[in-house]
Amino acid sequence: MKSTVLNFELKHWVKQPLFYFLSFGFYAFSLVTMLGTGGYFDDPSTTSELQSTLNSPFALSFIGFLLVKLMLFAFGVFGGIGIQRDFSSRIFGILYTYPVRKTNYLGGKLLSALFPVLILVLLTYSGLLTGELMLGTDSTKIGAFDFFGYFIGVCFYMLPTAIAISVFVFVSVGITRNIYAGFATVIFFILFQLILENTLFQYPNVLALLDPFGENAFIQATADWSIADKNSTMLPIGTMAVANRVFWLIATLLLFGWFVRKFNFQYSPFSLFGKMSFRKRKMTRKASGSYTVQSSTRKTSVFSFNSFSQLKQLTRVEFVSILKNKIFILLTFLACLLAFLIQLKVTNTGTFNFAPKTRIILGLPLSVFVQIVVFCTFLTSGTVVKRARRVNVAALEDSTAVTSSNVFFSKTIAIVLTIVMQLVIFTLASILLQLFNGQASVEIGLYAIHVFGLILPILICWSIFSQFVHVLIPNLYMSLGVLLACWLGVQSIEHLGVSTSVLKLYNLPVLVYSDLSGFSQLGSYLWLMLYWVLFSVILALLTFLLWIRSSELSLISRWSIFRKRMTRARSFVFTILVVNFSWLGVSIYSNERGEAHYSNDLLDANLAQYESVWECYALLDQPKISNVDLVLDIYPDEKRFSAIGEYFLVNKEQAPIDTVFVRTSYDELTTIDWQGKAKLILSDSLFHSYLYSLDEPLLPGDSVSLHFTVESNENTLFYRNSSVLSSGTYLKQDFLPRIGYQFVEHEQEVDKEHGHRHNYFHRDADLVKIRTTITTQSNQYGIGPGELLSKKENGNRATFVYETPKPVKFNFSFHSGDFQFKSTKYEEVEIQAYFAADHGENVEMMIDGLKAAAEFNTQLFGTYPYETVRIVEFPHTEESFSATLTSNNIPTSELMFCINQKAMGGDVQLPFYVLAHELTHEWFGNQLIPADNAGAKMLTESITEYITLCIYEEHFGEKKAKEFLEVQYERFREGRKVEKGEESTLADVLTHQEYISYGKGAIAFHEISEAIGRKKFNTLLALFLKLWDANAGKYPTTYDFINFLKDNSGDQYHKLIDRWFLEIHPI
Amino acid sequence: MKISIQNISKTYTNGVRAIDHLNLEISQGMFGLLGPNGAGKSSLMRTLATLQSPDSGEVWLNDLNILSNPLEYRRVLGYLPQEFGVYPKETAQDLLHYFGILKGITSKKERNAVVDYVLDITNLTEVRKKRVSTFSGGMRQRFGIAQLLLNDPKVIIVDEPTAGLDPEERSRFLNVLRRISNENIVLFSTHLVEDVRALCNDMAVVNKGRLLAQAPPKDAASSLSGSIWETTLEADRLANLEGVIPLSEYFSSTGEQINRVYAKAKPSDHFTGVTPKLEDFYFLTLKTA
């Protein structure tokens, strides 16, 4: 009997276009994914970095985890439809009277549900295999074919997951007799995993065991794998992965066993609560009582009709019907729960804790919430559009005198209202959460603008698109499949080489908000929003014209009805909309492509030619910048700046210089003026390179002045060409002209002839003096390098004059913002903090960090050379780093001001640590500047990290310092895992290898200092600093330091020193 | 008030010709549409309910072309299809309010009155707060009538409404229809001749989408007066008799098979003249079409 049921169901599947649609869809998707990731659609390129291969057991399992999420919807269909169609077709009334054993019936149904799932899984991996074969072993991303890679991906990870979820879907549909329960089940699985990840991250074994996809068990099993390991034939299976698979296998079997036991061939669905079903039966009997014809008379026959009132009332009915939907309630609840958990996770990263600022809540938590709302909208719009036909009420409704427009708009408005309601719930819950966490200032206005002004319109667009698809395709599964394919396809469209926003359905730039400068990319967001809104209006009109109000569902009939409804007036409106939409699309497309002032692609394409002409000038002796005089006018309202400046260039070489190589910024418009002392002999406007011949050669020790002007470019729709913000402008020295050829690699070995004549940071400048006049709006404060000499206001402009009291490294920052201000003194040094309103919570801790660093370093390495040190906040949108030291300014990221140190309790005090670290760079980084060699960061970051650790220990005690050191160990271990090149020794650490320079460096210096003795070691550091003072134009290499240390510590430490600095060894 | 169906045809995309150049006049009162299964009754009903458009032809309600003015026509239309569903979790009262809104009764006060009236007339007042999905077949059909009556329709179309009802429910259901047919057009399709005989003042027989006959039931039966005979002769022998058209058969209380036939004159002594019934007209029409 089981085989009869199975055969019958299988025959059904092979006749279903949906089966072929999904099978082909997933095969094609996995194929395109493999090809796209493997660079099949890209131009050929070469790289020396170690590439991750795509066909290793690790990669194939990893890709499987991504694909299985996309396949969940298919599991929802296949898992539930077999048993559901017996209910929907009402054949169960007959079938259940047959002498069939329920094990045979349910077994046959389940096996038939698993058949298409198996086919889908196999086809998906076949797509990957085809991709592998098409890419071929010539591709750097394809290794040798490994059967076990596919075997593990299919049999150990994807198929068991697919079977487990399909069984859960099967049971949920079997219990409820509602196919939507199947979709709710797959959504539940996604959310369940997310909830586990956000709640159990501190219990990795429990997380690995419970994760229904086995993904966290996989991550745990491969956590320590390097890229080479991931490319090897090692199988990504660990103990917890096996336990996870067994756990879910048992859970699946138990669930199915329970279902078989509870299932009965009954007309009524079986209830988990027996008493309730009894009560229902009683009610039904009572309801079928006696019947007599009444003699009442009609009270009214002429109705007062109001079309708007009808629309309102119908909307209410539709809205209430959605609200009563348990799946909607469940999804909304889970969306809120997930948003809450993600908010907890992003504000508590394990090491650091951020305050739940509005902009944080409106970041990832809102983004995840919105994704679930979009999915929820697919379901609700499907329910609303198709429910009359699904329960066979359509004939009654369609024959009433209600206008199709009222039916259409009532459903549309009801869906929009549910979206609004979900967003209101999110907003209120978030505000309550903020208040609960002691956030005094809840930015209601920001919520209103972001959630309801910028997100809601796009969600409405999704709802219209969703309605359109549901109306166009009467089959619910097919329409949901198309919607999901569009939704997920948008994320993958770039794999096909499509980068333009006009083809990425409802995909807008990510909104990033800074408390200082507001939204970034708002202009492009609004234009794209308008574009998609227009598209949705067109879709709404088409949806209305395609609206089914007939018993005829054939394409021919619907096309005929569509043509009848497309009146002349509607055609006119439709044409106007399409023309406007197209015009907007074309202008956005041309904006995207044409308005960048430079393009990396263009530069890359012309690099070889440029180098062939200009590389010969790399060896030219060039003068160095010694003095800078700059007038910088910042216009925050207009988002632009202009600058006039003068350099004094000094010939520090032994021979005369007659040719000067000048480079100007790519982003700005620069003019160079030698005031008649030089002629332009060669130029390249693409690479902004200019070669000047001096009228009179510059003799050794002589100087010449170079005048320049710099203007920021205007911002365009999609490109921000100017770094000026409405508040919190942070300009670096990048906009200034530079001297010499730019593509010079750091010297790998010390140039014996020239010694250490270039520093690591700037080949065209040793230490320089700079005087800056900054003008800005009078309601903003201008900040530049050095001490403030004067400040005055003239109308709506304010002028600030700064000068460095001594020559400094050519690293400058210029700021303008509407800042709050706090000031305190340490000895003779004034510590100032400039920060955004409501960002003052951590300022005291930052100041403490500066004081502690000043005290520690002053005692060991000499006095702080400025009268002032400034902490200046910059928007987190501008730079990814936490803080940096530029002369006596420490530009500090907005993120540092939002760390919730109170909530972190005794954990590492990041604001203290970061500021102490940066100020320490005044000695190791500014006073001691490494030579232009590999390993330079050991002399800046490693030493600074070590000193910061000492400061931390002095301030917070040994226990806290050990915790801090543990963070460095972790940093090193994690960094090694993702190293794509070769791991360097500390002495030769490369610029990007921060896990070595910071992580390993801190540990190395700590270990050596512990061996030698902390006091002695620190004294040696002080001596080395004195020996290599940058003021004397001397730049050491790491080997200078290592030799110095060996010479002054003792033979017994040489092995230890070599081990830490010159060897690669795992910690 | 009358509906005039003029030469309408409808062929579905699968090639089935459901309505074939059909002409029909339907006047006030109960109009029965008789025909076997698949005769095209439901297709005609759906067309008259504006749920599908004919490929050709016109349909008029007095001076109103209902195909080009469906909305206006729907204001006076009440339709009960052969099969209909309900929203599973809605009570009778809530659903009637919903249909009331769809039918344009936007004043809540008026709608309350109308819903109470239709619940009353269909005797569903007691169960108004129960879910319709839990109703028995008869109650559900009464609910169908209740929703139909909400807009005080002038044209009522009911498609095989008594199918599946027990005799008591059926009788009472038909009484409701009879009561509401006084001033309206009630188009009532069935394959039960008895229902038409008991209710309708006019009727039509259709098969294969074509109109085979139209006549008041009484006239239809009496038109066969002197032409209907009963005999115990076996069916195969009847087939050889010229001018005899077998219509139906039944078994007498003694277990004898009696054949009922049409013949213009008494075929032989084995035949006994009987009073014609509407059923005879129906079968004769189908067999002679």
Image (tube, rainbow, N blue to C red):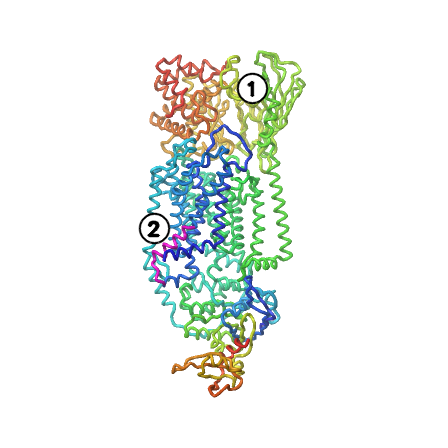
At label 2, counting other C-alpha atoms closer than 10 Å, the crowd grade (few under 14, some 14-19, many 20 or more) is: some
- Front-most of residues A551 and A103: A103
**Residue A255: mark:** 2
Which quarter shows the N terminus of chain A? bottom left
- Kindly report the distance in space between the C-alpha atoms of the residues bearing marks 2 and 1: 72 Å
Q: Is residue A532 at all visible to an observer of this figure?
A: yes
Residue ID for mark 1: A764
Q: Crowding at label 1, few (<14), some or many (≥20) Cα neighbours within 10 Å?
A: some
Magenta segment includes A114: yes
User: Which segment is the magenta one?
Assistant: A98-115
Disc 2 marks a residue whose amino acid type is Leu
Q: Mark 1, chain letter?
A: A
Name which quarter of the figure residue A849 lies in: top left
Identify the residue at image location x=58%, y=48%. Answer: A535
Look at the picture and state if A32 lies above or below A890: below
Looking at the image, tell me whether mark 2 or mark 1 is earlier in sequence order.
Answer: 2
Residue A658 among those drawn in magenta: no
With respect to residue B240, does A480 lie above or below? above
Quadrant of the image for the C terminus of chain A?
top left
Q: Are marks 2 and 1 in contact (CB under 8 Å)?
A: no
Total number of numbered labels?
A: 2
Q: Give the label, 2 or 1, closer to the camera.
A: 2
Mark 1: secondary structure: loop
Magenta part mainly helix, strand or loop?
helix
Query: Tag 2, which chain?
Result: A
Q: Nearer the viewer, residue A264 or A437?
A: A264
Residue A869 image offset from top left, x and y in percent: 48, 24
Provide residue A87's location: percent of width, then percent of height. 41, 59
